Amino acid sequence: MLLPMEVLYRSDKCKTVRYNSSNEPHNIPGYNDFEKPFGQQGSSNIWRTHIAIDGGGKCQWQLNSIKVSFKIADGVSTPVLVPRTF
């Protein structure tokens, strides 16, 4: 069974503040993550979805990573690594 794609966008424009062990603030790139389900193409065995490489908006989101996973018969979730091809 194909699980929803996990998508992560990053932004250098919209930062997030994190604190270290000395309670000093540090700006890190903002992030926006979500799951995107696949849709079956007709009655075939082809499943697909669409995502934007450039998420845009006021933060100028850029695609950082995607993760595709599936469950095999015994219920174990197995991630599939997809090389960056864009």
Image (spheres, helix red, strand yellow):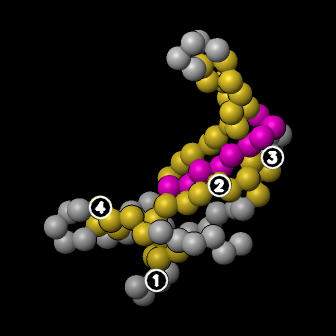
Counting residues from the start of the chain, the first of labels 1 and 2 encountered is: 1
- Main SS, magenta residues: strand
Residue at the image position 68 percent from the left and 56 percent from the top: 63
Q: Evaluate if marks 1 and 3 touch, with contact meaning CB atoms under 8 Å apart.
A: no
Tag 1: amino acid: Ile
Q: Residue at x 49, y 81 (%)?
A: 41
Q: Check disc 3 and give the amino acid type.
A: Gln
On whether residue 29 falls in the magenta region, the answer is no
Q: Mark 1 — residue?
A: 46
Q: Spatial distance from mark 4 to mark 3, Cα to Cα?
A: 32 Å
Q: Residue furthest front?
A: 22
Front one among 46 and 31: 31
Label 3 sits on residue: 60
Among numbered discs 4 and 3, the one appearing first in the sequence: 3
Based on the picture, tell me whether residue 13 belongs to the magenta stretch: yes
Q: Which residue is mark 2?
A: 64
Q: Split into 4 quadrants, where in the image is the N terminus?
A: bottom left
* Label 2 with label 3: CB-CB less than 8 Å: no
The residue drawn where x is 74% and y is 48% is 61
Q: CA distance from mark 1 to mark 4?
A: 20 Å
Give coordinates of residue 19: x percent, y percent.
Answer: 60, 19
Q: Amino acid at mark 2?
A: Asn
